[in-house]
Every structure is written in structure tokens, then in C-alpha cells.
Amino acid sequence: MKKRPHVVVTRRLPDAIETRMRELFETELNIDDVPMSPDALAAAMQRAEVLVPTVTDRIDAALIAAAGPQLKLIASFSNGFDHIDVEAALKRGIAVTNTPGVLTEDTADMTMALILAVPRRLVEGARVLSADRDWAGWTPTWMLGRRVTGKRLGIVGMGRIGQAVARRARAFGVSIHYHNRHRVAPQVEEALEATWWDSLDQMLARMDIISINCPRTPGTYHLLSERRLKLMRPEAYLVNTARGEIVDEAALIKLIASGAIAGAGLDVYENEPMINPKLLRLAEAGKVVLLPHMGSATIEGRIEMGEKVLINIRAFFDGHKPPDRVLPSML
Ligand code: DGY
């Protein structure tokens, strides 16, 4: 019988995926779902031929340097791969794969939900109907938000998720603008009636809502710096479902608190799972809507992510190129 690869999975995955993983490979599961410490990860990388981490595991250059020679593949259960030092892994001959494509629609749904929730004060309104509060009834001037229809949405990063957000926003009568390193194909622009801005600064200064949908790379760290955030209009909102580090969070907090930016909808944070207490206070004041990194959290999406991990591992050990390799050109 062919020797089965030794796989270490760092977090609990959907049951169906864990079961298939055990059928196919020599698999160590993390049934308690306790995040692994750096020491536990280092030990896992000493015995595993395949490591299956998630976005909560920081696989940095030091861990990769200390990995045993048997480690051949890091098959991440994630779309993003900013938690892995891919360059260091590739240099050591360790392949890296991710799970692109299967969480596009779910993440775009959540982005659209935040685009609606912030200007329409959805969370603030829902809080009014709670056991410890009385609602005095409808009034003409209470709980007024801002209309979404007719506004301009500036999408930063017009890849798969950015385009899926644009499709949704168009159905709400929002006009689409975008900034992307490369202009998208003319037929995509045409279908979305999208306006391309080569200058992010110029776009920021003219939009009603900004949505961050680009990956976190060394080039996008604090892409929305304090200087750039200051270009936004005081009536504008920022929505981020990509990665916290793309936005200078401290500057964003300052600008919302001072009224220089109207508000924000955030699903991701600079120091997850730590949340800046000032953000919590802004949420209390109804200036921001905060979600706990749940953009892709659907049962269907998580199963499809797991299936991608299985296919990537299987292809690798069958001697094929795994379909979702992270390549140097993607860094
Ligand atoms: C990913 O997979 O990169 C997501 O951030 C998880 O929701």
C-alpha cells in the first residue's frame, strides 16, 4: 500500500472535510480547535509533510527555516496568504497553495451588507428593539441615515471580489468606480459601467463609499494611509472586508471621531483578534459597524474551501501541479 502523506491541520474544519482528510491521508486533526502557539506550529512543521494552516496561524520565515526536511507543502485553508512567508517557503522548496474563488460571492455579500448597514444605521436601529429599551414609535426626523442609491462607490482592488461587489452595488443604483494596478478588460468595465482611476488619491477624493477589496501584500500595507484617508470627503464611508493592515486603523479612528470621515463598516482589523477599544466606542456611538472577520463564513463556502485543500494535497502527492499554487508572480 502506498504510504499516505502525513498531514497536520491546525484548526477544526467542517466535519465532512475532516472525515475525508482522514480517509485520504495520515491526518492529525485539532479537535479542540485551540489556536496553535508558535512552539506548537514549529513542532508540527517538524513532523508534517503537509501543514494545513488558516489565517490565524502566522507562518513566518523563522518557522519555515526551522521546518523539518519532510515538509513539502503548506496547503492553506484560506483565500489570502499574507499569514505565510511564501517567499521563504518557496526558497526552501516548500510549495504553498490557497483556496481562491470559492468565497468570492460570500465575501461580496458581506461587503454589500456593510455598504448598506453603515449609511442606513442598520445595527443602531436593531439595537433599539431590545428587552431593556422602549421604542417611542415612528417619527419623521428620527434614525435618519443616508440614501445609498445614486451614490458613487470606489472599489480599491478590482479582482474577483471587487467585481462581485460591483455587480451587487449596481443593482442598488450605485455607480461604480475603481482603482486597480491594472485596468480590467474593456468588456468587464462596460458590463459594470465602471470608471477606472489610475490615481487612487483622485478617486478617494470623489467617492461617497470606498470599499477595500485588494489582497494584503507588502505593497498594500497601509495603502489607505493617514494622508490618503484625509482625502476622503466628510460624508464618505469606508468599508473593509479584505485585511485590516491595508488601512491605517489609528488614523481611520481619529478621522471618524473628528467627523472628517462619516463612518466605516469593518470586518477585518490590524491586530486581530484584538480590537482597538476606540473602535468599540465608535460602534457604541453608531459611527462604525464592526463584524468579527466573517465575510466568508458560510457553511457552503467553508466546505468548498476544504475541498480545495483536499484537491491541492491530492494533486501534489499524485505528482501533478496543485491547481491553487501560490506563485512568485502573485506576491
Ligand atoms: C481568507 O480565507 O483569506 C479569509 O480572510 C477568511 O475569511
Image (spheres, rainbow, N blue to C red):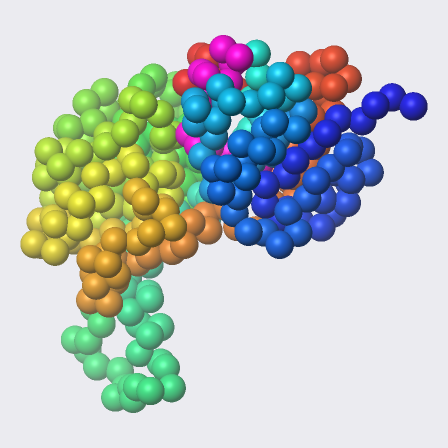
Quadrant in which the N terminus is drawn: top right
Along the line of sight, the residue nearer the viewer: 194 or 85: 85
Q: Magenta stretch containing residue 262, yes or no?
A: no
Say if residue 187 shows up in the picture: no
Left or right side of 267 for 278: left
Toward the right, the furthest residue is 1
Left or right side of 206 for 96: right
- Residue at left offset 36%, top offset 47%: 272
Query: Does 252 sit above or below residue 162?
Result: below
Residue 271 at x, y = what percent? 32, 44
Quadrant in which the C terminus is drawn: top left
Query: Does 310 sit above or below residue 70?
Result: below
Q: Which secondary structure is most common in the magenta stretch?
A: loop
Residue 22 at x, y = what percent? 78, 40
Left or right side of 307 for 22: right
Magenta-colored span: 77-92
**Where, by quadrant of the figure, is residue 6 drawn?**
top right
Along the line of sight, the residue nearer the viewer: 46 or 19: 46
Query: Does 21 sit above or below residue 158?
Result: below
- Residue at left offset 66%, top offset 51%: 31
**Where, by quadrant of the figure, is residue 197 drawn?**
top left
- Residue at left offset 20%, top offset 54%: 263
- Residue at left offset 23%, top offset 30%: 223
Residue 330 at x, y = what percent? 44, 17
Residue 228 at x, y = what percent? 14, 33
Say if residue 64 shows up in the picture: yes
Along the line of sight, the residue nearer the viewer: 65 or 204: 65
